[in-house]
Image (tube, coloured by chain):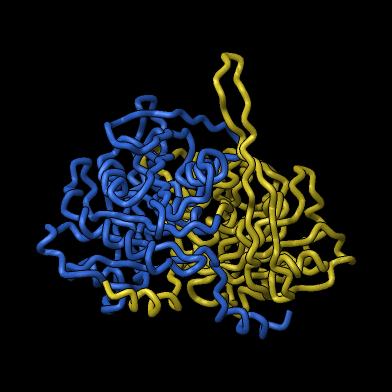
Chain colours: A yellow, B blue
Amino acid sequence: MSKKPLILVTNDDGITAPGIRTLISVMNEIGEVVVVAPDSPQSAMGHAITINSTLHSNKVKIDNGPQLEYSCSGTPADCVKLGINEILKRKPDICVSGINHGSNSSINVIYSGTMSAALEASIEGVPAIGFSLLDYRWNAEFENIRTFVKKITLLSLEKGIPEGNALNVNFPKLSEKEIKGIKICRQAKAYWIEKFDKRKNPQGKEYYWLTGEFINEDHKSDSDEWALKNGFISIVPVKFDMTDHKSIIKIKNWNF
Amino acid sequence: MSKKPLILVTNDDGITAPGIRTLISVMNEIGEVVVVAPDSPQSAMGHAITINSTLHSNKVKIDNGPQLEYSCSGTPADCVKLGINEILKRKPDICVSGINHGSNSSINVIYSGTMSAALEASIEGVPAIGFSLLDYRWNAEFENIRTFVKKITLLSLEKGIPEGNALNVNFPKLSEKEIKGIKICRQAKAYWIEKFDKRKNPQGKEYYWLTGEFINEDHKSDSDEWALKNGFISIVPVKFDMTDHKSIIKIKNWNF
């Protein structure tokens, strides 16, 4: 690339989260950075967008880096729409989302605000990557994965992410030296078993907290769960075309 | 099927919307019906789930039908989780979502609360169908499509929806006689061009409304948009495995 790439950065943990601050700092080494990120945490927002209420956005300055930053009252997908269609003067060369505090592997991709932002960018024709670290803590060690985040972004810019795809990148909770490498994977067939924690409020009215247990019965070595469990970074190419093409013929045989 | 099927009904327009009231009435002709639906509109919520706040649910009675009904403060995906894991005594034989007031064809599937409810059921191993009518009005003519909704549900129970799939069913805004038939399709490659309507509030602060224009440049006859434009009901089998398997080999060649 002759000129500096234009990079749109977003996340779902909110603009002040340590994960996005590390991502911004890495992206400043690669290109011209514009941040459009939620003003408050938006985890598990899936691909929600804001159509029945208003959106607010403010130009903000959070650290001394050269990036431009805008906070937004909306969801991660809203941030990407606002960034691409309203704030940026030209289409970004890439959109990076994260670094998420916690895993977005296997089925978690569908609930993930981090990945919905990346998918929204790919819907709009912008190559995109979502980064997540398997550490839910606010003070997770993002410095361990700087080198890999930079390498994966540079290679994506050089090679070109396949059209209609976004990359779902998950990092094991290991030091840089302990990480064994990078595996290109498929989404494991894992799921959650929900448990609703039923409680009573001070007025005696029942309410619930949604909790759950993550179950993975898919232990094949081409899955993202296998890669992460065995010390590798997993990269899954995900797509926004949700059609199951193989099922079309089956259902045609139903004879409506 | 020897005994009456157990049917979980939900939607994203809220439990009092005419679309779900028609769906409940049709399902009462087929099986034992339990409704778990949002207590307020939840359109465009994508696959959002509620993990950072509490959930409330109330047993309600809205009409004189034999169904059991529960309203829920959460998203469509929350309703399905609550229904399957907390309210129902056994796994439902099918989950139906809708009938949505407005289209969920092509790319709209990813933003759709109606379809996220159906996909959530399929993640939990329950066959699922999302129904949508291409008419955004509150008083849309749902009676026109009763026969088709019943037929598609009965055939799905009889034949079995392929594992890991949910059916995305969209109806054109036509009378029963005008509808030409049913087409099994793929999701069209359509998208939205966002337009942010920038305004000032009474205090002079800027805010936005997200609006957009739907663009379909995919006119092939195997797409859902073609079917709907030509007077057919479209059925797209959608899946929650978002991996683009064809891209895995391409990216493996990047030589990390």
A65 displayed left or right of A85: right
Work out whether residue A186 or residue B33 is closer to the camera in this orientation and state it: B33
Residue B210, horizontal then vertical, whole percent: 37, 46
The residue at the far left in this view is: B177
Q: From the viewer's perspective, is residue A251 above or below residue B166?
A: below
Residue drawn where x is 23% and y is 60% of the image: B148
Q: Going by the picture, which residue comes out furthest to the right?
A: A177
Quarter of the image with the C terminus of chain A in it: bottom left
Which image quadrant: the N terminus of chain A?
bottom right
Q: Quadrant of residue B160?
A: bottom left
The spot of residue B23 in percent (x, y) is 29, 47
Say which residue appears at 35% left-offset and 60% top-offset: B192
Residue B233, picture quadrant: bottom left
Image-based side of A124 in relation to B242, left or right: left
Can you tell which quarter of the image residue B171 is in? Answer: bottom left
Whole-percent x, y for residue B72 in the image: 46, 34
